[in-house]
Image (tube, helix red, strand yellow):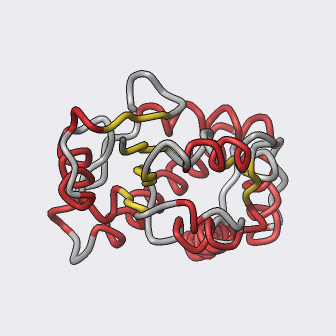
């Protein structure tokens, strides 16, 4: 059996609340102080309604993912600043995005769930495992830094497949990479709709 696993909020989660991290980076880049809960709420809403990356407009899947994240983060900041009658130079907001993107490339920005390693040890006795995640090229180094990459035959991201879950294309790409039929695989994630 092939066991396919999502990454974020299934195996790993941010080590600090997203709103807090965004607020800290925004203050460091612009000297503006925004309530982390305000940012957290804006992030949740914008993330849930954002369209998929446009993979056709970029030279790589990773490039499309970076562009997608940049648009999302800058939109969140723009809406919050406008709502609070604040402003910041575009160059400072761009620098803030770069800082945040690099932050989430660090394994220390993520943490394992308490049961992750126990689950992976048990699941590895049942069959091969692979990660299938709406992520970019930062994921493999993060999982490596957290000490769990060796459990997986492959770590496949939407940047690799140039498609995001729940699109069939990312699952077909994964099954081809793993030389496996869909009937021989199961998937575990945190979202019934996306996974």
Q: Position of residue 114 (x, y in %)?
A: 81, 42
Q: Residue at x 18, y 42 (%)?
A: 181
Quadrant for residue 71, please give it.
bottom left
- Decide: is 18 above or below 71: above
Q: Is residue 147 above or below residue 133?
A: below
Figure label count: 0
The residue sitting at 74% across, 35% down in the picture is 38
Position in image of residue 187 (x %, y %): 40, 35
Rendering quarter of residue 37: top right
Residue nearer the viewer, 111 or 162: 111
Left or right of 166 in this view: 143:
right
Q: Quadrant of the C terminus?
A: top left
Front position in the image: 75 or 5: 5
Q: Position of residue 192 (x, y in %)?
A: 44, 22
User: In the image, what residue occupies the spot 37% across and 45% down?
Assistant: 2
Q: Is residue 18 left or right of residue 178?
A: right
């Amino acid at each position: 059996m092939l066991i396919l696993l999502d990454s974020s909020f299934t195996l790993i989660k941010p080590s600090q609340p997203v709103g807090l991290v965004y607020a800290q980076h925004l203050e460091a880049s612009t000297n503006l102080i925004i309530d982390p809960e305000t940012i957290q709420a804006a992030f949740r809403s914008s993330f849930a309604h954002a369209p998929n990356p446009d993979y056709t407009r970029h030279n790589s899947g990773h490039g499309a993912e970076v562009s997608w994240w940049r648009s999302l983060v800058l939109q969140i900041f723009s809406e919050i600043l406008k709502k609070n009658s604040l402003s910041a130079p575009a160059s400072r907001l761009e620098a803030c995005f770069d800082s945040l993107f690099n932050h989430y490339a660090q394994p220390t920005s993520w943490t394992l769930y308490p049961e992750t390693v126990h689950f992976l040890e048990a699941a590895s006795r049942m069959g091969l495992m692979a990660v299938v995640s709406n992520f970019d090229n930062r994921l493999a180094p993060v999982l490596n830094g957290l000490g769990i990459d060796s459990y997986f035959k492959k770590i496949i991201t939407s940047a690799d497949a140039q498609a995001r879950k729940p699109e069939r294309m990312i699952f077909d790409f994964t099954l081809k990479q793993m030389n496996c039929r869909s009937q021989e695989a199961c998937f575990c994630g945190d979202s019934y709709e996306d996974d």
